[in-house]
Image: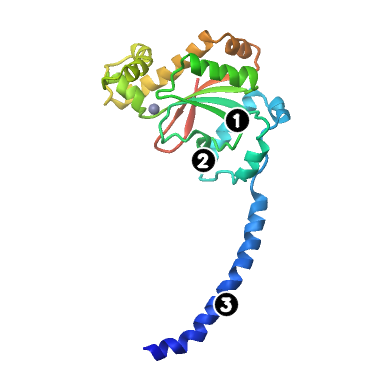
Amino acid sequence: MKKHLFLLAPFFALVVLSACNQPAQDTSDATSDAEELTAAVMTKADQDAMTPQAALDDLMAGNARYMQNDLTARDLPAQVQGTTDGQFPKAVILSCIDSRVPVEMVFDQGVGDVFVARVAGNVEDEDVLGSIEYAVGVAGSKVVMVLGHEACGAVKSAVDQLDVGSENVTHLLGQIEPAIANTEGERDASDKKYLSDVIHTNVEMTLDDIRSRSAIVRQLEEEGKIKLVGAYYSLHDGSVTLMD
Ligand SMILES: [Zn+2]
Protein backbone atom coordinates (compact mmCIF):
# COMPACT_ATOMS: atom_id res chain seq x y z
CA MET A 1 0.00 0.00 0.00
CA LYS A 2 2.85 2.34 0.92
CA LYS A 3 4.42 1.55 -2.40
CA HIS A 4 1.28 2.51 -4.27
CA LEU A 5 1.08 5.81 -2.47
CA PHE A 6 4.68 6.48 -3.31
CA LEU A 7 3.97 5.86 -6.97
CA LEU A 8 1.09 8.29 -6.83
CA ALA A 9 3.22 11.00 -5.28
CA PRO A 10 4.18 12.66 -8.60
CA PHE A 11 0.50 12.81 -9.50
CA PHE A 12 -0.32 14.54 -6.20
CA ALA A 13 2.56 16.90 -6.77
CA LEU A 14 1.06 17.84 -10.13
CA VAL A 15 -2.34 18.39 -8.58
CA VAL A 16 -0.82 20.57 -5.87
CA LEU A 17 1.16 22.53 -8.46
CA SER A 18 -1.86 23.13 -10.62
CA ALA A 19 -3.87 24.04 -7.51
CA CYS A 20 -1.14 26.58 -6.72
CA ASN A 21 -1.77 28.11 -10.11
CA GLN A 22 -5.48 28.46 -9.41
CA PRO A 23 -5.35 31.45 -7.07
CA ALA A 24 -3.80 33.64 -9.76
CA GLN A 25 -6.78 32.96 -12.03
CA ASP A 26 -9.26 33.30 -9.17
CA THR A 27 -7.77 36.64 -8.19
CA SER A 28 -8.22 38.05 -11.66
CA ASP A 29 -11.80 36.79 -11.71
CA ALA A 30 -12.44 38.32 -8.27
CA THR A 31 -10.98 41.59 -9.47
CA SER A 32 -13.32 41.73 -12.44
CA ASP A 33 -16.23 40.82 -10.13
CA ALA A 34 -15.24 43.59 -7.73
CA GLU A 35 -15.42 46.09 -10.55
CA GLU A 36 -19.09 45.24 -10.97
CA LEU A 37 -19.98 45.92 -7.31
CA THR A 38 -22.08 49.01 -6.70
CA ALA A 39 -20.07 51.58 -4.78
CA ALA A 40 -22.34 54.55 -5.51
CA VAL A 41 -24.32 56.07 -2.63
CA MET A 42 -27.19 58.56 -2.44
CA THR A 43 -25.90 62.13 -2.87
CA LYS A 44 -27.70 65.40 -2.17
CA ALA A 45 -28.12 65.84 -5.92
CA ASP A 46 -29.65 62.34 -6.22
CA GLN A 47 -32.03 63.07 -3.38
CA ASP A 48 -33.01 66.52 -4.71
CA ALA A 49 -33.72 65.08 -8.15
CA MET A 50 -35.87 62.26 -6.77
CA THR A 51 -39.63 62.80 -6.60
CA PRO A 52 -41.58 61.10 -3.79
CA GLN A 53 -43.11 58.74 -6.38
CA ALA A 54 -39.65 57.92 -7.80
CA ALA A 55 -38.40 57.11 -4.31
CA LEU A 56 -41.37 54.82 -3.75
CA ASP A 57 -40.87 53.19 -7.17
CA ASP A 58 -37.23 52.57 -6.26
CA LEU A 59 -38.24 50.78 -3.07
CA MET A 60 -40.78 48.63 -4.87
CA ALA A 61 -38.30 47.75 -7.63
CA GLY A 62 -35.91 46.73 -4.86
CA ASN A 63 -38.59 44.48 -3.37
CA ALA A 64 -39.05 42.82 -6.76
CA ARG A 65 -35.28 42.09 -6.88
CA TYR A 66 -35.46 40.72 -3.31
CA MET A 67 -38.24 38.35 -4.33
CA GLN A 68 -36.27 37.25 -7.40
CA ASN A 69 -33.13 36.61 -5.29
CA ASP A 70 -31.41 39.28 -7.35
CA LEU A 71 -30.11 41.71 -4.71
CA THR A 72 -27.70 44.38 -5.90
CA ALA A 73 -24.05 43.36 -5.37
CA ARG A 74 -22.60 46.15 -3.26
CA ASP A 75 -19.11 47.22 -2.34
CA LEU A 76 -20.10 47.82 1.27
CA PRO A 77 -16.74 49.19 2.50
CA ALA A 78 -16.85 51.68 -0.40
CA GLN A 79 -20.41 52.64 0.53
CA VAL A 80 -19.32 53.07 4.15
CA GLN A 81 -16.52 55.37 2.96
CA GLY A 82 -18.90 57.17 0.63
CA THR A 83 -21.35 58.02 3.39
CA THR A 84 -18.89 58.94 6.14
CA ASP A 85 -19.44 62.67 5.77
CA GLY A 86 -23.19 62.75 5.26
CA GLN A 87 -26.40 60.94 4.32
CA PHE A 88 -29.23 61.69 1.95
CA PRO A 89 -31.69 58.78 2.37
CA LYS A 90 -34.66 58.55 0.03
CA ALA A 91 -37.15 57.28 2.61
CA VAL A 92 -37.92 56.57 6.23
CA ILE A 93 -39.55 53.25 6.96
CA LEU A 94 -41.32 52.46 10.22
CA SER A 95 -41.30 48.69 10.64
CA CYS A 96 -41.97 46.06 13.27
CA ILE A 97 -38.87 44.56 14.90
CA ASP A 98 -39.73 41.12 13.46
CA SER A 99 -36.55 39.31 12.39
CA ARG A 100 -38.31 37.97 9.32
CA VAL A 101 -38.67 41.48 7.91
CA PRO A 102 -35.06 42.54 7.17
CA VAL A 103 -36.03 45.98 5.92
CA GLU A 104 -32.95 47.04 3.93
CA MET A 105 -32.85 43.64 2.24
CA VAL A 106 -36.60 43.60 1.61
CA PHE A 107 -36.17 46.78 -0.48
CA ASP A 108 -32.61 46.01 -1.71
CA GLN A 109 -31.19 49.19 -0.23
CA GLY A 110 -27.57 49.92 0.62
CA VAL A 111 -25.65 52.04 3.09
CA GLY A 112 -27.16 55.51 3.40
CA ASP A 113 -30.24 54.73 1.32
CA VAL A 114 -33.03 54.59 3.93
CA PHE A 115 -33.80 55.47 7.52
CA VAL A 116 -35.39 52.58 9.39
CA ALA A 117 -37.33 53.02 12.64
CA ARG A 118 -38.30 49.74 14.26
CA VAL A 119 -40.64 49.03 17.12
CA ALA A 120 -42.78 45.98 17.79
CA GLY A 121 -46.12 46.47 16.06
CA ASN A 122 -44.85 49.47 14.04
CA VAL A 123 -46.63 52.02 16.21
CA GLU A 124 -45.57 55.64 16.64
CA ASP A 125 -44.69 57.49 19.82
CA GLU A 126 -43.02 60.87 20.35
CA ASP A 127 -39.56 59.45 19.73
CA VAL A 128 -40.59 57.73 16.51
CA LEU A 129 -42.41 60.89 15.40
CA GLY A 130 -39.31 62.93 16.14
CA SER A 131 -37.23 60.47 14.14
CA ILE A 132 -39.60 60.67 11.16
CA GLU A 133 -39.62 64.48 11.38
CA TYR A 134 -35.82 64.47 11.35
CA ALA A 135 -35.82 62.20 8.29
CA VAL A 136 -38.19 64.31 6.19
CA GLY A 137 -37.75 67.75 7.73
CA VAL A 138 -33.98 67.85 8.17
CA ALA A 139 -32.47 65.04 6.10
CA GLY A 140 -34.73 65.46 3.05
CA SER A 141 -36.28 62.01 2.70
CA LYS A 142 -39.18 61.74 0.25
CA VAL A 143 -41.24 58.83 1.55
CA VAL A 144 -42.67 57.90 4.95
CA MET A 145 -43.62 54.24 4.87
CA VAL A 146 -45.35 52.32 7.67
CA LEU A 147 -44.66 48.65 7.03
CA GLY A 148 -46.86 46.09 8.74
CA HIS A 149 -46.44 42.40 8.21
CA GLU A 150 -48.29 39.12 8.08
CA ALA A 151 -48.79 37.26 11.38
CA CYS A 152 -47.35 40.12 13.45
CA GLY A 153 -46.61 38.75 16.92
CA ALA A 154 -47.08 42.13 18.57
CA VAL A 155 -50.54 42.59 17.06
CA LYS A 156 -51.40 39.00 17.86
CA SER A 157 -50.32 39.51 21.48
CA ALA A 158 -52.40 42.68 21.70
CA VAL A 159 -55.46 40.82 20.39
CA ASP A 160 -54.77 38.08 22.96
CA GLN A 161 -54.30 40.72 25.69
CA LEU A 162 -51.02 39.09 26.61
CA ASP A 163 -49.93 39.90 30.15
CA VAL A 164 -46.33 39.08 30.98
CA GLY A 165 -46.32 41.21 34.13
CA SER A 166 -44.40 44.05 32.50
CA GLU A 167 -45.66 47.63 32.35
CA ASN A 168 -43.53 48.16 29.27
CA VAL A 169 -45.09 45.33 27.30
CA THR A 170 -48.57 46.31 28.48
CA HIS A 171 -47.93 49.90 27.36
CA LEU A 172 -46.69 48.79 23.95
CA LEU A 173 -49.61 46.42 23.34
CA GLY A 174 -51.98 49.18 24.49
CA GLN A 175 -50.76 51.23 21.51
CA ILE A 176 -52.32 48.61 19.23
CA GLU A 177 -55.64 48.56 21.11
CA PRO A 178 -57.23 51.38 19.00
CA ALA A 179 -56.65 49.29 15.85
CA ILE A 180 -58.44 46.37 17.47
CA ALA A 181 -61.32 48.64 18.47
CA ASN A 182 -61.57 49.84 14.86
CA THR A 183 -61.58 46.41 13.24
CA GLU A 184 -64.80 44.50 12.68
CA GLY A 185 -65.02 40.89 13.76
CA GLU A 186 -64.68 38.70 16.79
CA ARG A 187 -61.51 39.34 18.82
CA ASP A 188 -59.71 36.13 17.89
CA ALA A 189 -55.98 36.03 17.06
CA SER A 190 -56.27 32.50 15.64
CA ASP A 191 -58.53 33.87 12.91
CA LYS A 192 -55.99 34.74 10.20
CA LYS A 193 -58.37 37.00 8.29
CA TYR A 194 -59.24 38.94 11.44
CA LEU A 195 -55.57 39.23 12.46
CA SER A 196 -54.65 40.47 8.98
CA ASP A 197 -57.46 43.04 9.17
CA VAL A 198 -56.19 44.34 12.53
CA ILE A 199 -52.63 44.54 11.15
CA HIS A 200 -53.89 46.58 8.17
CA THR A 201 -56.00 48.82 10.43
CA ASN A 202 -52.97 49.32 12.66
CA VAL A 203 -50.87 50.50 9.71
CA GLU A 204 -53.61 52.89 8.57
CA MET A 205 -54.09 54.29 12.08
CA THR A 206 -50.35 54.72 12.57
CA LEU A 207 -50.24 56.73 9.34
CA ASP A 208 -53.23 58.83 10.45
CA ASP A 209 -51.56 59.41 13.82
CA ILE A 210 -48.32 60.50 12.15
CA ARG A 211 -50.29 63.00 10.04
CA SER A 212 -52.35 64.33 12.93
CA ARG A 213 -49.50 64.52 15.44
CA SER A 214 -46.81 65.99 13.18
CA ALA A 215 -47.28 69.45 11.69
CA ILE A 216 -43.99 69.03 9.80
CA VAL A 217 -45.12 65.82 8.08
CA ARG A 218 -48.57 67.27 7.36
CA GLN A 219 -47.14 70.38 5.75
CA LEU A 220 -44.58 68.53 3.61
CA GLU A 221 -47.28 66.12 2.44
CA GLU A 222 -49.64 68.98 1.57
CA GLU A 223 -46.85 70.63 -0.40
CA GLY A 224 -46.29 67.40 -2.31
CA LYS A 225 -42.71 67.15 -1.08
CA ILE A 226 -43.21 63.80 0.60
CA LYS A 227 -45.46 60.79 0.21
CA LEU A 228 -46.96 58.77 3.08
CA VAL A 229 -47.71 55.13 2.36
CA GLY A 230 -48.85 52.07 4.24
CA ALA A 231 -47.53 48.67 3.20
CA TYR A 232 -47.91 45.01 4.12
CA TYR A 233 -45.13 42.42 4.00
CA SER A 234 -45.94 38.78 3.27
CA LEU A 235 -43.99 36.22 5.30
CA HIS A 236 -44.89 33.68 2.61
CA ASP A 237 -43.21 35.21 -0.42
CA GLY A 238 -41.41 38.36 0.75
CA SER A 239 -43.68 40.63 -1.26
CA VAL A 240 -44.56 44.14 -0.12
CA THR A 241 -48.06 45.27 -1.07
CA LEU A 242 -48.88 48.97 -0.94
CA MET A 243 -52.12 49.89 0.81
CA ASP A 244 -54.49 52.63 -0.42
ZN1 LIG B 1 -44.51 42.25 14.04
Whole-Å distance between the Cαs marked 2 and 3?
A: 41 Å
Marks 1/3 in contact by CB < 8 Å: the verdict is no
From what the image shows, is residue 209 above or below residue 38? above
Q: Which residue is mark 1?
A: 57
Amino acid found under the numbered disc labelled 1: Asp
Which label is found at residue 117? none
Marks 1/2 in contact by CB < 8 Å: the verdict is no
Estimate how packed mark 1 is, as few (under 14), some (14 to 19) or many (20 or more) residues with alpha carbons within 10 Å. few
Q: Earlier in the sequence, mark 2 or mark 3?
A: 3
Q: Secondary structure at mark 2?
A: helix
Q: Earlier in the sequence, mark 1 or mark 3?
A: 3
Q: Which residue is mark 2?
A: 66
Whole-Å distance between the Cαs marked 1 and 2?
A: 14 Å
Estimate how packed mark 3 is, as few (under 14), some (14 to 19) or many (20 or more) residues with alpha carbons within 10 Å. few
Q: Secondary structure at mark 1?
A: helix
Amino acid found under the numbered disc labelled 3: Leu
Q: Where residue 173 appears, x then y in whole percent?
A: 34, 18
Ligand 1, seen in the image, is in the quarter at top left
Residue 101, image quadrant:
top left
Task: Identify which residue is drawn at 66% across, 40% down.
Answer: 81
Q: Which residue is mark 3?
A: 17
Let me know if residue 226 appears in the view: no
From what the image shows, is residue 184 above or below residue 44? above
Q: Where residue 217 appears, x then y in whole percent?
A: 58, 13
Mark 3 lies within 8 Å of ligand 1 (Cβ measured)? no
Task: Identify which residue is drawn at 51% across, 45% down.
Answer: 69
